[in-house]
Amino acid sequence: MDQTQQLARYFSGFGETGGFLAKVPAAEEPHVAHWRQYLQEGGGTGSGFFQALQSKLPQLCIPQREGVSASPAYAKVMKKGLPFEEKDFGGCLELECPEVLELKIPSHFAGALPVLQTPHREDFLRLVRAIGGRCEPRIYPEGMHAMCIGGINNWDRVRLLKEQWQRGQVDQTPGEHWGSALQRFVQQKPELIRDRVLVLHTAPYGSVAHTLVPGMHDASTWLAASNTLRLEHEFTHYATTRFYGSMRSNMLDELVADCMGFLAALGTFPAQLFRRCMGITSEGRAPSGARARLYMADFDDPVIDKILGITLKAAANLEQALEQHVIRSAGPELFFALTAFTLPDMASPEGVHLIGAGLARTDP
């Protein structure tokens, strides 16, 4: 596929949006109830809570070293479900500041999710590596402050499922042993043993200083707003998974998620602040290391410049349409209105009118 074809696919939208509002709020995924129990049992914060969570998720115990995921000890714990033992790994993973780790489970129209949050950067990275990186000491971009991690093997839930299977409380096949039953569940009902978790780092959104945020007078207020913004941004990506079946790396997805986040945190969507938070210069370029480049990794610079131009025009049109319709908050109606468009739609000369017409259909 050449870049012209790639670009056409990149500029495609989310798909048909009709009928989804009737499904709001979405039902919670099965793992959320188990995390509510973890929250209740461990208290949801502090070193004692982290130790309690380690007893449920052995990947949070494994020391992070190069090649550890290929070791027999790792296979024993993470592939066979045997108990973690320090002697097999020469130690146990520790957080530098476990006392500031927090678990919360916010409600959302896409369904609630467990959220692990810490203001400690290294602890954030350790959590991401443990839960989503096979305990390998991978380096992540400095500007990454959030990750939605799915497909997490939860051996605590596997043990509970085995007990239910032994008691005949879940589907059984005559003559089937537990190993075969587990493989069947993995293939047919992975939601019974696999989790999805948001991991967040408390930091200024987009690494932007509060002095560059319109109407923001101090760093602490911007930090609090950033927490709200980042959470809504990630839940918006989750919403695209629940309603459209995918979580894409795409500037349209980022524009919609940032719009929802800005409105939730600030009550407005400033297009210039969106540009800054994406790391895009005032000339419309994305230098090396800019957040925006993460979502255009398959393209060369001329195509990237084209995508950026369309994105920035779409953002400006979106800001104008939101102001005209006095939209001050995020919600499912806005989400479905915005996901009805493509980037070229929003960036077109008629973009303000098109977006406005979509917003008008959401008015009470």
Image (cartoon, helix red, strand yellow):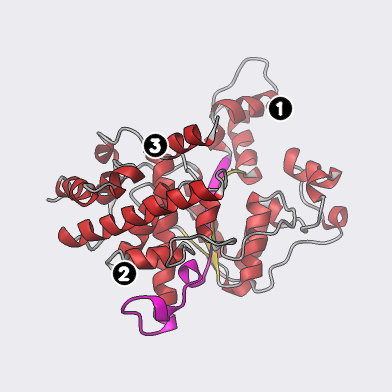
Task: Please tell me how crowded label 3 is: few (under 14), some (14-19), or many (20+) other residues with Cα within 10 Å.
Answer: some
Q: How many marks?
A: 3
Residue kind at label 2, given as amino acid type: Leu
Question: Does label 1 or label 2 sit earlier along the sequence?
Answer: 1
Q: Nearer the viewer, mark 3 or mark 1?
A: 3
Q: Which residue is mark 1?
A: 179
Residue 198 sits inside the magenta stretch: yes
Residue occupying the point 37% across, 38% down: 14
Q: Which residue is mark 3?
A: 12
Seen as rendered, the residue at the extreme front is 302
Percent x, y of residue 120:
60, 72
Task: Please tell me how crowded label 2 is: few (under 14), some (14-19), or many (20+) other residues with Cα within 10 Å.
Answer: many
Percent x, y of residue 143:
56, 65
Element at label 3: loop
Left or right, 232 with reference to 153: left
Task: Please tell me how crowded label 1 is: few (under 14), some (14-19), or many (20+) other residues with Cα within 10 Å.
Answer: few
Residue 8 sits inside the magenta stretch: no
The boundaries of the magenta stretch are 194-221
Element at label 2: helix
Q: Nearer the viewer, mark 3 or mark 2?
A: 3
Residue kind at label 3, given as amino acid type: Ser
Left or right, 105 with reference to 177: left
Question: What whole-number distance in Å separates the C-alpha atoms at marks 3 and 1?
Answer: 42 Å
Seen as rendered, the residue at the extreme left is 364
